[in-house]
Every structure is written in C-alpha cells, then in structure tokens.
Amino acid sequence: MRHLWSFLAGLVVAPVTWVLITLGQDGSGRTVDRWVEIGTYNTANLIEPAVYLGVAGILLGLVGTLRTSPVGPLVAGLLLVTPYVGMFIAPFTVLDRIPDDWKVLGDPLPLRQPVQDGTLFLVGLLLLVAVFSAQRWRRWPQPATGLEPAPADDDTPPPPSFATSDWPPPPPARSEPDTAPLTLGYPDLDTPTEPLPRRTSSESPWSAPPRYGAKPENSTDNR
C-alpha cells in the first residue's frame, strides 16, 4: 500500500512542481528585468515568485527525502527528465507538444522555459539519485516485543547509618583523659597505719587521752 501512495504522490508532484517552477522563474526574471529597465527596485515584487519556488522546493524535498517508498521519487524524476531527454531526439516535436500560451491568475505560464534552460532535467536527476538511497528500501524499525527494559542506573543515595528518630545525629565521641572514680575518702586497706603509743602500767587507759609524742621518763623535761 505504501508503494501505491508513493506512486500517486510522484505522479501528482511532478506536474505541480513543473508549474510552480515555471511561475517562479518567469516572475523572478520579469521582475529583475523591470528593475534594470527603470533603474530602481522594490523587493516586495519578488515575494510572489519566491513563494512559488519555495512551495516547489518543499514538495520536492518531501518526495525525495521521506522514507515511505522509492516509487514516488522514481516516477517524479522520470516525468521531469523525459522532456529534456526528448530534446536530444526530436526537439521541435517536444516543444510543439508543450503548451506555451497558458495563464494562471492572469500571469503567463511559459512551460517551455524550465525545459529549455535545463531546470527540469536538474531536478529530475536529483529525485532519481534519491531512489538509490539504501535507507529508502528499508522499513521503519519496529519496537522489539517481549524484551524487558534494561534497568536504569540507580542514582538513589545510600540510606543513613542512623535512625530517623535520632536526628540530629549525635556528635562524634571525643577522647578524654581517664578520671579517677568518686570515693568517700576512706584510705585503702593496703595503706599502713601508725602504731598507737605504748601505755605504762600506772596509767589507766581511761584516765587521760593518749598523748602522742611522749618523751622517755628519764628525760629532764618530766621533772
């Protein structure tokens, strides 16, 4: 079906392009000749022929580049090349077969002009060359079915090492010097104690408090 639609498109585009090229070339040529004749110009006069040539270029581009079928550009190229090739065989017969007195919207339509200057031959060759593009003979790639999509790269950051309820996170531990444990002030069991003073036989242990640092009896201070 796509070849049929492409064939019909080429069959229509070829004569339409011929007419548009003729209108654009004739309008541009007469406009420039008029500028030279009067010695001044007005670029607005080129808008109409430029539109004709632009539409012709778009149609040729669609037929020559779209990957639908090679039948369209083949048909259009052959139709456009044939009049110029016929000039090598029977030029007067070809020119007599081409009407040259038609008008479109009051403007003359000299269809012989693009044949005589070789414009149709050039455009037709461009379309024929487009037929030999290897991409035209291939169908559009179909999406593969039954294949699992490749896993996408996981850009998710790793989870935090602390629970969400511990926010903000605790400060890092600092190294502090070891401190002595709290005590009640009692001496250690291994600490030696001073011996109690020796009592004499004449004194009662309850008569007087013990006196530390007592001097011997024969000392002169006890007298």
Image: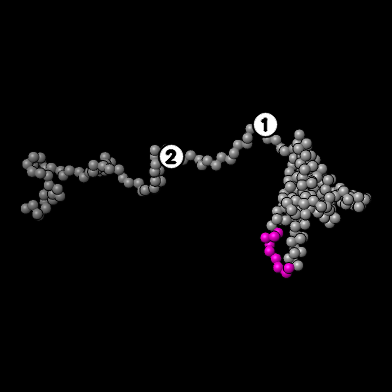
Question: Which range of residues does the magenta coloring cover?
Answer: 38-46
Furthest toward the top, the residue is 146
- Give how far across and how far down residue 55 sits, in percent: 72, 50
Mark 2 or 1: in front is 1
Q: Amino acid at mark 2?
A: Phe
- Give how far across and how far down residue 11 sits, in percent: 79, 42
In depth, the one of 174 and 122 nearer the eye is 122
Give left or right: position of 96 versus 170: right
Inspect this view and state whether residue 61 appears.
Answer: no
Q: How many badges with numbers are in the image?
A: 2
Give left or right: position of 169 versus 195: right
In depth, the one of 58 and 38 nearer the eye is 38
Q: Is residue 1 above or below residue 126?
A: above
The span from disc 2 to disc 1 (Cα, nearest Å) is 44 Å
Give me the residue at 67% from left, 60% from top: 44
Please give the label number shown on residue 145.
Answer: 1
Inspect this view and state whether residue 66 appears.
Answer: yes
Local SS, label 1? loop
- Give how far across and how far down residue 143 sits, in percent: 68, 35
Give left or right: position of 117 versus 163: right
Q: Is residue 212 magenta?
A: no
- Residue at image mark 2: 162
Q: Amino acid at mark 1?
A: Thr
